[in-house]
Amino acid sequence: MTQKKRKKSRRKAGRRKSDNHLPGWISMLMGLFLGLAVALYVYITDPTPPSIVLVKPPQSSAQPANAVPEVVDTTETSSQPAITFDFYDMLPNLGVEVYEDEKVPVRAATPARVSKPGIYILQAGSFSRIDDAKRRKAEMALLGIRADIKRGQANKRTVYRVYTDPMEDPAQVNDMSKKLQHANIEILLKRVSD
């Protein structure tokens, strides 16, 4: 065979292979349709019945027309007895006693009035976490009241107390205590000295 005939036969052989090969997108579509066909067959021929059936009760004069239909579960057909709960009947008969370790301070209807001259400070809270004390200090700053946080001990625990600056004028003490109580901040009035 000559070289020209060999090249022609190779070209023809190469063309035959490329003519038999399908493009990738056609193969993908065929796989997709085959998968959908199998899923449809399984869906249609599935022998299990639906597990929940809605049953519409007959209309009566006592029941409104827009009532919700009752849901019946048909999967549970075993001979187990139905579970009943008695706690709905038992709870109203039980009494719960609440014990208070500490009495909650009773907030006075009117702020404490200071009439004697002296040096006073107001404690605006005692907290176990520094973040809570800082939050109270910020609340007071929004009211225009300068406060400091002091660390101390109470019942072998570290506490953070929020104090106002010392004040000598009784009118200023009364005004500040009134302002804090209107902001729902409980205070404790302390006299430092005369």
Image (cartoon, rainbow, N blue to C red):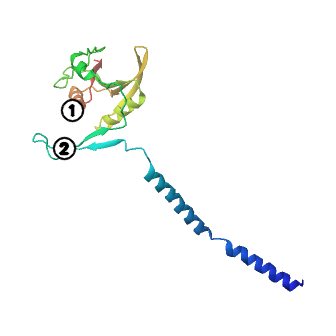
Q: Quadrant of the N terminus?
A: bottom right
Direction right: furthest residue? 1
Tell me where residue 20 sits by quadrant: bottom right
Point out residue 154 in the picture as x, y percentages from the top left corner.
39, 16
Residue 110 placement, left or right of 82: left
Q: Give the secondary structure at mark 1.
A: helix
Q: Inspect the image, locate mark 2, and give the three-letter code of the amino acid beneath it.
A: Ala
Residue of label 2: 67
Q: Amino acid at mark 1?
A: His
Of residues 45 and 170, the one nearer the viewer is 45
Measured from the top left, where is residue 159 in percent x and y? 40, 21
Q: Is residue 53 above or below residue 145?
A: below
In the depicted structure, whether residue 163 falls above or below residue 35:
above
Count residues near mark 2 (Cα–Cα under 10 Å), then give few for <14, some for 14-19, many for 20+: few
Vertical arrangement, residue 18 with respect to residue 42, above or below: below
Q: CA distance from mark 1 to mark 2?
A: 50 Å
Find residue 174 and report its image quarter: top left
In the image, residue 14 sits, relative to residue 93, either above or below, namely below
